[in-house]
Amino acid sequence: MKIAKYWARESAEVEDVKGCKYHLISWSGSNQSVVAAKNKALEKLGRWQAQLKAGQFLGDYHYADKDEIKEELIQELHDAEGKLIAAITRNRYGALVLNSAQVLFADVDLPIAVRPGLISRLASWFSHKQPDDRQSLREEYQQHFVDFHQQHPDLMLRVYETAAGFRLMVINKLFDPLSDETEALLKRLNSDRLYRQLCRSQACFRARLTPKPWRCGSKNPPNTYPRQDEQAEQRYLDWLNQYEQKTKDYAVCRLINELGRSGTVEPALAIMRLHDDYVLSTGAQTLA
Protein backbone atom coordinates (compact mmCIF):
# COMPACT_ATOMS: atom_id res chain seq x y z
CA MET A 1 0.00 0.00 0.00
CA LYS A 2 1.72 3.13 -1.24
CA ILE A 3 0.81 5.80 1.31
CA ALA A 4 3.12 8.70 2.26
CA LYS A 5 2.90 11.18 5.15
CA TYR A 6 5.41 13.71 3.82
CA TRP A 7 5.73 15.23 0.35
CA ALA A 8 8.22 17.39 -1.52
CA ARG A 9 8.18 19.04 -4.93
CA GLU A 10 11.30 19.70 -7.00
CA SER A 11 11.66 21.06 -10.52
CA ALA A 12 14.44 21.61 -13.02
CA GLU A 13 15.08 23.03 -16.50
CA VAL A 14 16.89 20.38 -18.53
CA GLU A 15 17.92 19.72 -22.13
CA ASP A 16 17.82 16.50 -24.09
CA VAL A 17 20.53 15.21 -26.40
CA LYS A 18 19.26 17.45 -29.22
CA GLY A 19 19.23 20.58 -27.09
CA CYS A 20 15.44 20.70 -26.65
CA LYS A 21 14.49 22.23 -23.31
CA TYR A 22 12.13 20.68 -20.77
CA HIS A 23 10.65 21.86 -17.49
CA LEU A 24 10.40 18.77 -15.29
CA ILE A 25 8.43 18.56 -12.05
CA SER A 26 8.96 15.78 -9.55
CA TRP A 27 6.73 14.98 -6.58
CA SER A 28 7.93 12.35 -4.14
CA GLY A 29 6.57 11.09 -0.86
CA SER A 30 8.11 9.53 2.23
CA ASN A 31 6.96 8.18 5.56
CA GLN A 32 10.23 9.27 7.20
CA SER A 33 10.49 13.03 6.71
CA VAL A 34 10.16 15.94 4.30
CA VAL A 35 13.94 15.77 3.78
CA ALA A 36 13.68 12.13 2.68
CA ALA A 37 10.87 13.07 0.28
CA LYS A 38 12.98 15.92 -1.10
CA ASN A 39 15.93 13.59 -1.70
CA LYS A 40 13.70 11.15 -3.58
CA ALA A 41 12.31 13.96 -5.74
CA LEU A 42 15.83 15.15 -6.58
CA GLU A 43 16.92 11.61 -7.39
CA LYS A 44 14.04 11.23 -9.84
CA LEU A 45 14.92 14.53 -11.52
CA GLY A 46 18.50 13.37 -11.93
CA ARG A 47 17.37 10.07 -13.44
CA TRP A 48 15.03 11.80 -15.90
CA GLN A 49 17.75 14.25 -16.91
CA ALA A 50 20.16 11.36 -17.58
CA GLN A 51 17.50 9.66 -19.73
CA LEU A 52 16.99 12.80 -21.80
CA LYS A 53 20.73 13.26 -22.22
CA ALA A 54 20.94 9.66 -23.44
CA GLY A 55 18.22 10.27 -26.01
CA GLN A 56 15.62 8.18 -24.21
CA PHE A 57 11.93 9.10 -24.39
CA LEU A 58 10.38 9.79 -20.99
CA GLY A 59 6.79 9.24 -22.10
CA ASP A 60 4.23 10.18 -19.46
CA TYR A 61 6.90 10.53 -16.82
CA HIS A 62 4.51 11.68 -14.09
CA TYR A 63 2.85 8.26 -14.11
CA ALA A 64 5.72 6.07 -15.19
CA ASP A 65 7.62 7.01 -12.03
CA LYS A 66 4.64 7.35 -9.73
CA ASP A 67 5.20 5.59 -6.42
CA GLU A 68 3.06 6.71 -3.50
CA ILE A 69 -0.52 7.95 -3.71
CA LYS A 70 -0.28 11.77 -3.70
CA GLU A 71 -3.27 12.30 -1.44
CA GLU A 72 -3.65 13.86 1.99
CA LEU A 73 -3.45 11.23 4.73
CA ILE A 74 -6.46 11.59 7.04
CA GLN A 75 -6.46 8.43 9.18
CA GLU A 76 -4.49 5.22 9.60
CA LEU A 77 -5.76 1.84 10.80
CA HIS A 78 -3.28 -0.62 12.34
CA ASP A 79 -3.69 -4.20 13.47
CA ALA A 80 -2.89 -5.52 16.94
CA GLU A 81 0.78 -5.83 16.01
CA GLY A 82 1.01 -2.25 14.80
CA LYS A 83 1.03 -3.07 11.08
CA LEU A 84 -0.69 -0.59 8.78
CA ILE A 85 -3.71 -2.36 7.25
CA ALA A 86 -5.71 0.58 5.90
CA ALA A 87 -5.61 4.33 5.48
CA ILE A 88 -8.14 7.01 4.66
CA THR A 89 -6.93 9.65 2.22
CA ARG A 90 -8.59 12.56 0.42
CA ASN A 91 -8.41 12.22 -3.35
CA ARG A 92 -7.85 14.85 -6.03
CA TYR A 93 -11.53 15.86 -6.20
CA GLY A 94 -11.92 16.02 -2.42
CA ALA A 95 -13.65 12.75 -1.53
CA LEU A 96 -12.41 10.53 1.27
CA VAL A 97 -11.10 7.15 0.11
CA LEU A 98 -10.44 3.98 2.10
CA ASN A 99 -7.20 2.29 1.02
CA SER A 100 -7.06 -1.36 2.08
CA ALA A 101 -3.85 -3.39 1.99
CA GLN A 102 -5.43 -6.87 1.86
CA VAL A 103 -9.20 -6.64 2.28
CA LEU A 104 -10.69 -6.87 -1.19
CA PHE A 105 -13.12 -4.31 -2.58
CA ALA A 106 -14.45 -4.66 -6.14
CA ASP A 107 -15.85 -1.69 -8.03
CA VAL A 108 -18.45 -2.78 -10.60
CA ASP A 109 -19.95 -0.10 -12.83
CA LEU A 110 -23.02 -0.44 -15.01
CA PRO A 111 -22.41 0.29 -18.70
CA ILE A 112 -22.37 3.96 -19.71
CA ALA A 113 -23.86 5.14 -23.01
CA VAL A 114 -21.28 6.63 -25.36
CA ARG A 115 -23.76 9.46 -26.03
CA PRO A 116 -27.57 9.80 -25.86
CA GLY A 117 -29.40 7.57 -28.30
CA LEU A 118 -26.63 5.01 -28.73
CA ILE A 119 -26.34 1.54 -27.21
CA SER A 120 -24.22 1.37 -24.09
CA ARG A 121 -20.85 -0.30 -23.97
CA LEU A 122 -21.85 -3.54 -22.31
CA ALA A 123 -20.02 -6.38 -20.72
CA SER A 124 -20.08 -9.41 -23.01
CA TRP A 125 -22.59 -11.27 -20.84
CA PHE A 126 -25.02 -8.29 -20.97
CA SER A 127 -24.63 -7.42 -24.64
CA HIS A 128 -28.35 -7.85 -25.41
CA LYS A 129 -29.52 -5.15 -22.98
CA GLN A 130 -30.53 -1.58 -23.85
CA PRO A 131 -29.13 1.37 -21.84
CA ASP A 132 -32.54 2.54 -20.59
CA ASP A 133 -33.33 -0.78 -18.95
CA ARG A 134 -31.28 0.09 -15.85
CA GLN A 135 -33.34 -1.76 -13.25
CA SER A 136 -33.36 -4.99 -15.23
CA LEU A 137 -29.64 -4.62 -15.80
CA ARG A 138 -29.04 -4.13 -12.07
CA GLU A 139 -31.03 -7.28 -11.35
CA GLU A 140 -28.91 -9.27 -13.81
CA TYR A 141 -25.71 -8.00 -12.21
CA GLN A 142 -27.02 -9.01 -8.79
CA GLN A 143 -27.87 -12.46 -10.10
CA HIS A 144 -24.35 -12.69 -11.50
CA PHE A 145 -22.97 -12.05 -8.01
CA VAL A 146 -25.18 -14.83 -6.64
CA ASP A 147 -23.99 -17.19 -9.38
CA PHE A 148 -20.40 -16.18 -8.69
CA HIS A 149 -20.83 -17.01 -5.02
CA GLN A 150 -22.29 -20.41 -5.84
CA GLN A 151 -19.05 -21.10 -7.70
CA HIS A 152 -17.01 -19.70 -4.81
CA PRO A 153 -18.97 -20.71 -1.68
CA ASP A 154 -15.85 -20.29 0.47
CA LEU A 155 -16.06 -16.50 0.10
CA MET A 156 -18.30 -14.25 2.18
CA LEU A 157 -19.39 -11.25 0.12
CA ARG A 158 -21.10 -8.02 1.05
CA VAL A 159 -22.84 -6.39 -1.91
CA TYR A 160 -23.49 -2.64 -1.90
CA GLU A 161 -25.41 -0.59 -4.45
CA THR A 162 -23.71 2.59 -5.67
CA ALA A 163 -24.78 5.44 -7.93
CA ALA A 164 -22.87 3.90 -10.85
CA GLY A 165 -23.35 0.22 -10.07
CA PHE A 166 -22.08 -1.93 -7.21
CA ARG A 167 -19.33 -2.36 -4.66
CA LEU A 168 -18.40 -5.76 -3.29
CA MET A 169 -16.31 -6.60 -0.24
CA VAL A 170 -14.85 -9.96 0.81
CA ILE A 171 -14.76 -10.22 4.60
CA ASN A 172 -13.46 -13.74 5.30
CA LYS A 173 -10.29 -13.89 3.23
CA LEU A 174 -7.33 -11.60 2.59
CA PHE A 175 -5.93 -10.90 -0.88
CA ASP A 176 -2.75 -9.59 -2.43
CA PRO A 177 -3.76 -6.71 -4.77
CA LEU A 178 -0.80 -7.57 -7.03
CA SER A 179 -1.55 -11.28 -7.46
CA ASP A 180 -2.93 -13.07 -10.50
CA GLU A 181 -5.56 -14.65 -8.25
CA THR A 182 -6.87 -11.22 -7.34
CA GLU A 183 -6.90 -10.05 -10.95
CA ALA A 184 -8.83 -13.16 -12.01
CA LEU A 185 -11.38 -12.76 -9.22
CA LEU A 186 -11.97 -9.09 -10.03
CA LYS A 187 -12.48 -9.97 -13.68
CA ARG A 188 -14.99 -12.68 -12.77
CA LEU A 189 -16.93 -10.12 -10.77
CA ASN A 190 -16.86 -7.84 -13.84
CA SER A 191 -14.96 -5.20 -11.89
CA ASP A 192 -14.06 -2.04 -13.75
CA ARG A 193 -10.83 -2.34 -15.77
CA LEU A 194 -9.48 1.02 -14.62
CA TYR A 195 -10.16 0.04 -11.02
CA ARG A 196 -8.18 -3.17 -11.49
CA GLN A 197 -5.27 -1.17 -12.91
CA LEU A 198 -5.46 1.21 -9.96
CA CYS A 199 -5.27 -1.68 -7.49
CA ARG A 200 -2.09 -2.92 -9.13
CA SER A 201 -0.40 0.47 -9.52
CA GLN A 202 -1.14 1.54 -5.94
CA ALA A 203 -0.83 -1.91 -4.34
CA CYS A 204 -4.11 -1.67 -2.47
CA PHE A 205 -7.88 -1.83 -2.85
CA ARG A 206 -9.82 1.43 -2.88
CA ALA A 207 -13.34 2.35 -1.74
CA ARG A 208 -14.69 5.91 -1.83
CA LEU A 209 -16.29 6.93 1.50
CA THR A 210 -17.86 10.33 0.68
CA PRO A 211 -19.83 11.54 -2.37
CA LYS A 212 -18.40 12.90 -5.58
CA PRO A 213 -18.80 16.69 -5.42
CA TRP A 214 -20.39 17.15 -8.86
CA ARG A 215 -23.17 14.71 -7.94
CA CYS A 216 -24.14 16.92 -4.99
CA GLY A 217 -24.06 20.38 -6.55
CA SER A 218 -20.59 21.10 -5.20
CA LYS A 219 -17.61 22.41 -7.11
CA ASN A 220 -14.31 20.58 -7.23
CA PRO A 221 -11.57 21.72 -4.80
CA PRO A 222 -9.76 24.97 -5.76
CA ASN A 223 -6.38 23.24 -5.52
CA THR A 224 -4.77 19.87 -4.87
CA TYR A 225 -2.67 18.38 -2.11
CA PRO A 226 0.00 19.24 -1.07
CA ARG A 227 -1.05 22.90 -1.03
CA GLN A 228 1.69 25.46 -1.50
CA ASP A 229 0.88 28.19 1.04
CA GLU A 230 -1.54 29.36 3.73
CA GLN A 231 -3.78 31.14 1.24
CA ALA A 232 -4.17 27.96 -0.79
CA GLU A 233 -4.88 26.05 2.41
CA GLN A 234 -7.59 28.52 3.43
CA ARG A 235 -9.27 28.37 0.01
CA TYR A 236 -9.29 24.61 0.34
CA LEU A 237 -10.77 24.73 3.87
CA ASP A 238 -13.52 27.07 2.67
CA TRP A 239 -14.31 24.63 -0.11
CA LEU A 240 -14.24 21.65 2.30
CA ASN A 241 -16.82 23.31 4.57
CA GLN A 242 -19.10 23.91 1.58
CA TYR A 243 -18.58 20.35 0.29
CA GLU A 244 -19.41 18.79 3.65
CA GLN A 245 -22.60 20.82 3.90
CA LYS A 246 -23.78 19.87 0.42
CA THR A 247 -23.06 16.15 0.84
CA LYS A 248 -25.06 15.69 4.06
CA ASP A 249 -28.14 14.53 2.15
CA TYR A 250 -26.29 12.00 0.01
CA ALA A 251 -24.94 8.49 0.56
CA VAL A 252 -22.13 6.70 -1.25
CA CYS A 253 -23.75 3.27 -1.20
CA ARG A 254 -26.28 1.03 0.53
CA LEU A 255 -25.95 -2.60 1.60
CA ILE A 256 -28.28 -4.81 -0.46
CA ASN A 257 -27.04 -8.38 0.04
CA GLU A 258 -24.74 -10.67 2.02
CA LEU A 259 -23.59 -13.91 0.42
CA GLY A 260 -22.03 -16.66 2.53
CA ARG A 261 -21.91 -17.40 6.24
CA SER A 262 -18.38 -18.66 6.77
CA GLY A 263 -17.44 -15.94 9.23
CA THR A 264 -14.98 -13.07 9.08
CA VAL A 265 -11.26 -12.62 9.56
CA GLU A 266 -9.20 -9.78 10.93
CA PRO A 267 -8.47 -7.22 9.63
CA ALA A 268 -11.53 -7.55 7.39
CA LEU A 269 -13.96 -7.04 10.26
CA ALA A 270 -12.23 -3.87 11.43
CA ILE A 271 -12.12 -2.45 7.92
CA MET A 272 -15.75 -3.38 7.30
CA ARG A 273 -16.77 -1.48 10.43
CA LEU A 274 -14.70 1.54 9.42
CA HIS A 275 -16.15 1.47 5.91
CA ASP A 276 -19.74 1.06 7.06
CA ASP A 277 -19.44 3.80 9.68
CA TYR A 278 -18.84 6.21 6.82
CA VAL A 279 -21.14 4.95 4.07
CA LEU A 280 -24.13 3.55 5.99
CA SER A 281 -24.50 6.00 8.86
CA THR A 282 -25.94 9.02 7.02
CA GLY A 283 -29.44 7.64 6.49
CA ALA A 284 -29.57 9.46 3.14
CA GLN A 285 -31.36 7.75 0.23
CA THR A 286 -29.85 9.52 -2.78
CA LEU A 287 -26.66 7.85 -3.95
CA ALA A 288 -23.71 9.96 -5.06
Image: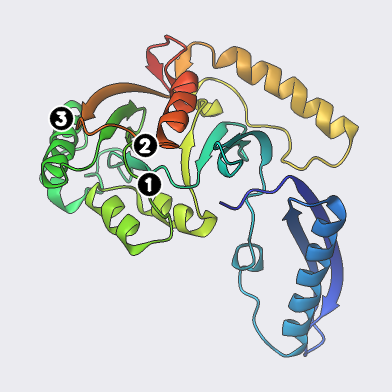
For the point 53% across and 54% down, the residue is 202
Q: Locate residue 6 relative to residue 2 in the image: left or right.
A: right
Numbered disc in front, either 3 or 2? 2
Image quarter of the C terminus: top left
Q: Residues within 10 Å of mark 1 (few under 14, many from 20)?
A: some
Numbered disc in front, either 1 or 2? 2
For the point 57% across and 31% down, the residue is 96
The CA distance from mark 1 to mark 3 is: 28 Å
User: Please, what secondary structure does the residue beneath circle 1 have?
Assistant: loop
Instruction: Please provide percent x and percent y for residue 33.
Output: 83, 51
Residue corresponding to mark 2: 265
Q: Disc number at residue 174?
A: 1
Q: Disc number at residue 139?
A: 3
Q: Residues within 10 Å of mark 3 (few under 14, many from 20)?
A: few
User: Please, what secondary structure does the residue beneath circle 3 have?
Assistant: helix
In the image, residue 283 above or below residue 129? above
Q: Nearer the viewer, residue 194 or 43?
A: 43
For the point 64% across and 48% down, the residue is 3
Instruction: Please provide percent x and percent y for residue 228.
Output: 85, 42
Q: Residues within 10 Å of mark 2 (few under 14, many from 20)?
A: some
Mark 1 vs 2, N-terminal side = 1
Mark 1 vs 3, N-terminal side = 3
The CA distance from mark 3 to mark 2 is: 29 Å
User: Please, what secondary structure does the residue beneath circle 2 have?
Assistant: loop
Tell me if label 1 and label 2 are in contact, CB under 8 Å.
yes
As shown in the figure, which amino acid type bears the numbered disc 1? Answer: Leu
In the image, residue 276 above or below residue 1? above
As shown in the figure, which amino acid type bears the numbered disc 2? Answer: Val
